[in-house]
């Protein structure tokens, strides 16, 4: 049986007493866009002018056959197939269901599987980008099918595509409260020639993700001293993350990358294909992440540091591949 034969058209004037088979939308540009009648509404005499005013001269009566799903049911099946931890579903509205975050955290969405679902005709999953920081209540994905009635087999195909990996398609990872050691390099700051402007910025970025600086130590442009402070944060303070500011580029006084290596850090990458933030360094020292932050982090609100820090706070390990992928679409300004 074809979906069309399950849907019979009835003139609105003859539809009093019939049940609406789907939500009906009104759009008045600049004033209103939304649901005028809800699915299940029993049409009354006084509804007829309103229905005609939104261009509905006919409505459908629906007799669903086995093997077919109504758009609301199909949207629910798609939404449930994608739903992972810390994600909630809205009620169907005009045939669409929205997945929302229940927490402040890092959203993870598997692009390959979203593409696989959207390759299937007449089903859609529309998402925000993976690795974004999200707030409670923030929309992560909208999903729906295109026709009013769809073959169940198509929805099952989408469900299989959505479930084709060991981890959920859409989830939100909570942030862990990290104890952060901050080393500010630069003889001009160490000797008091200028006032430190890095500390407050880094503290604020960490606080926004639920982490805190346990101590900020100033160091002159000397590799030995900087490396010693790194190891002190690691061994004595048991910091969860060690951040170094300044001295990241090409001047003879820029000692920070060398000092990070000298402390024994395994470097994932010195150099990040994102602008601003290209001189950023990421490495791991005995499993503890170590990052060298270039000067731009002080004044620019969106650098490679702002992209990678939420992932570290959510407990992810940064790989070379993660750095590589920042390049495409990573030119913000320079
Ligand atoms: N010829 C090149 N020039 C630059 C390069 C390069 O590769 N070749 N890289 C550029 C990029 S990208 C950046 S970002 C900047 C800054 O890099 P650094 O991390 O090495 O920054 P510094 O040289 O240490 O300092 C730059 C500037 O900022 C002041 N500063 C540093 N720390 C503090 C602090 N804690 N509080 C206040 N002010 C601070 C410092 O005094 C300098 O004025 O380099 C580009 N240039
Ligand atoms: O590390 Mo620099 O940001 O490319 O300005």
Image (cartoon, rainbow, N blue to C red):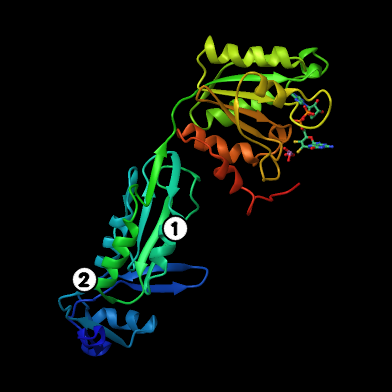
Can see residue 99?
A: yes
Q: CA distance from mark 1 to mark 2?
A: 37 Å
> Which secondary structure, mark 1?
helix
Quadrant assignment, res 222: top right
Quadrant assignment, res 107: top left
Estimate the x, y position of residue 148 in percent, counting from the top left: 29, 76
Report the quarter where the N terminus lies.
bottom left
Of 119 and 191, which appears nearest the observer?
119
Which residue corresponds to the image point at 34% horizontal and 52% vertical from the top-left?
Answer: 165
User: Dot 1: within a 10 Å radius of its alpha carbon, few (fewer than 14), some, or many (20 or more) residues?
Assistant: few
Whether the residue under disc 2 has CB within 8 Å of ligand 2: no
Q: Is residue 106 above or below residue 237?
A: below
Q: Is residue 161 above or below residue 230?
A: below
Q: Which mark is residue 40?
A: 2
Outermost residue to the left:
66
Of 264 and 296, which appears nearest the observer?
264
The answer to whether mark 1 and mark 2 are in CB contact below 8 A is: no
- Write down the residue under mark 1: 112
> Which secondary structure, mark 2?
loop
């Amino acid at each position: 049986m074809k979906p069309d034969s399950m849907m019979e058209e009835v003139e609105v004037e003859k539809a009093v007493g019939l049940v609406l088979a789907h939500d009906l939308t009104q759009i008045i540009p600049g004033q209103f866009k939304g649901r005028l009648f809800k699915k299940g509404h029993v049409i009354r005499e006084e509804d007829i002018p309103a229905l005609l005013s939104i261009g509905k001269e006919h409505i459908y009566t629906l007799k669903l056959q086995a093997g077919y799903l109504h758009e609301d049911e199909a949207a629910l099946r798609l939404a449930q197939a994608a739903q992972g931890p810390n994600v909630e579903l809205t009620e169907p509205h005009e045939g669409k269901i929205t997945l929302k975050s229940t927490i402040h955290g890092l959203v993870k969405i598997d692009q390959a599987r979203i593409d696989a679902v959207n390759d299937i005709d007449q089903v859609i999953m529309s998402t925000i980008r993976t690795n974004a920081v999200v707030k409670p209540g923030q929309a992560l994905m909208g999903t729906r099918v295109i026709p009013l009635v769809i073959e169940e087999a198509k929805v099952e195909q989408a469900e299989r595509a959505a479930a084709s990996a060991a981890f959920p398609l859409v989830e939100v990872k909570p942030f862990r409260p990290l104890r952060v050691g901050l080393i500010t390099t630069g003889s001009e700051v160490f000797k008091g020639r200028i006032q430190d402007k890095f500390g407050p910025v880094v503290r604020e970025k960490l606080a926004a993700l639920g982490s805190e600086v346990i101590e900020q130590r100033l160091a002159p442009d000397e590799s030995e001293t900087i490396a010693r402070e790194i190891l002190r944060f690691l061994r004595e303070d048991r910091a969860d993350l060690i951040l170094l500011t300044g001295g990241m580029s090409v001047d003879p006084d820029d000692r920070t990358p060398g000092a990070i290596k000298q402390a024994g850090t395994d470097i994932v990458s010195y150099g990040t294909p994102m602008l601003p933030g290209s001189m950023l360094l990421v490495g791991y020292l005995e499993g503890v992440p170590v990052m060298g932050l270039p000067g731009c982090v002080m004044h620019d609100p969106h650098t490679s540091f702002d992209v990678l820090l939420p992932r570290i706070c959510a407990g992810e390990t940064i790989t070379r591949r993660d750095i590589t992928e920042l390049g495409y679409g990573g030119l913000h300004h320079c």
